[in-house]
Image (cartoon, rainbow, N blue to C red):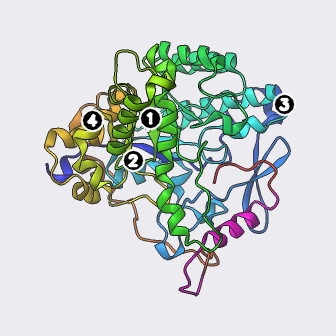
Amino acid sequence: MDMNDLVIVSVDDHIIEPPDMWDNHLSVQHKAIAPRMVRDATADYWIFEGKRVSQGATNAVVGRPREEYGFEPTGLDQMRRGTWDIDAHIDDMNVNGILASINFPSIISFDGSLFLKYENKADARILVSAYNDWHIDEWCGKYPGRSIPTAVMPMWDVAACVAEIERIARKGCHSLAFSENPTAKGLPSIHDSHWEPFWKACADNRMALNLHIGTGFLPAHASPLTPIDAWITSFPMTIAAAAADWLHLDALNRYPLKISLSEGGIGWVPYFLERAEYTHVHHSAWTHASFGSRTPTQTFRDHFLTCFVEDKFGLKNLEEIGEKIVAYECDYPHSDTQWPQVPENFMKTVAGLTDEQIDRVSHLNALEFFDYDAIGIMGGRANCTVGALRAKATHVDVGEVPLEGVAPVQKGTTRRVTSGDVMAMQAKLFAHDEMAADA
């Protein structure tokens, strides 16, 4: 397949929320509870329920020289405009050859769990719906076919979750962000009957659940002296812990739930499935695990979607994973992203696959899983290819832009950056926070 004929959909990107996001989605009587962005001498930050939340730790370093990478951006002026402005965001998608993408929140955490920390849960419930309305109607709605709407939930209240699912489904949204492990947020386990109405509502409304790494299982830093590279390397594979937990969710035997494992890679999946099969054969006699009439592998392939940035090993073993459960992720604007050269790198990664397999992992699996007809909305494949999108983006500047006065974790030295360096930087960044979002 020629690179310019590719159609690429990303199932994992991120939004840096703009300061005016609440303006059009709260009634007059609720304007007073709107979070607001404030600027001090060094940073932008948000005020949620009277408490400071840092804009930083978003890792939104796209367009920066790699020497400046780190978790240091603390203001919108330190980030590429496409991270927070939808018009510029579409430009950045076009120049990168990306047709459509899922965009996770940042300041409210990848699963919206910042609202769990609200003392006034009635206010939090209003803000969840306001966030979803902004995301669906403004961020996604301005450019139909380009962003797959993905909502957040009032996770502390199952009845409210059900009501919100039904409401966003009526707006055409069939995707939501959820925690990999609710118990890490002080909520009941996914194996508790507490969630039964939630599973039913998801199934009834064709709602896909997105479990993003870091929303329940977070790798510990081995030691302060450990090179940070070790933590970065292991982070995506923490998704395997979530996969094992959710694979044994009994609700999968009752409902056609769809679960996307976001930003977790695919190379681990063949052994994961082999181990799941071995465990079931050797241990189910005493553990009483049940997959109904299916095997663990069949269950995984019936319910889960996995994704990759660059995973040549996984794609070489696509048959062992399942051709219909693998999708692409760009991870814009984080440091793993290959923007603006996704198509070039994608072609190297999928070398050896057939054109049919390339179509599967580049866009078909994602669009089918999320029940989103981006190609139809855009008027046909000819308008959706890398070549067609890049033709719209000849005005976009993709040159690297260093920022004066913005230092990476370690500047002016070749000493290896350690976990201790990053932990100290984050501690300083969040020193005044009382309600911190996911890093």
Task: Relative to 37, say whether 246 is above or below.
Answer: above
Q: Secondary structure at mark 1?
A: strand
For this view, does 357 lie left or right of residue 79?
left
Q: Amino acid at mark 3?
A: Asn
For this view, does 373 lie left or right of residue 5?
right
User: Which badge, 4 or 2, is on the more N-terminal residue?
Assistant: 4
Pointer 2 residue = 329
Q: How far is disc 1 from disc 3 in space, using C-alphas?
A: 31 Å
Q: Secondary structure at mark 4?
A: loop
For this view, does 241 lie left or right of residue 341?
right
User: Which badge, 4 or 1, is on the more N-terminal residue?
Assistant: 1
Q: Secondary structure at mark 3?
A: loop
Q: How far is disc 4 from disc 1 in space, using C-alphas?
A: 14 Å
Q: Amino acid at mark 2?
A: Glu
Residue toward you, 141 or 317: 317
Pointer 4 residue = 322
Query: Over which residues does the magenta segment extend?
Result: 411-432
Q: Amino acid at mark 4?
A: Gly
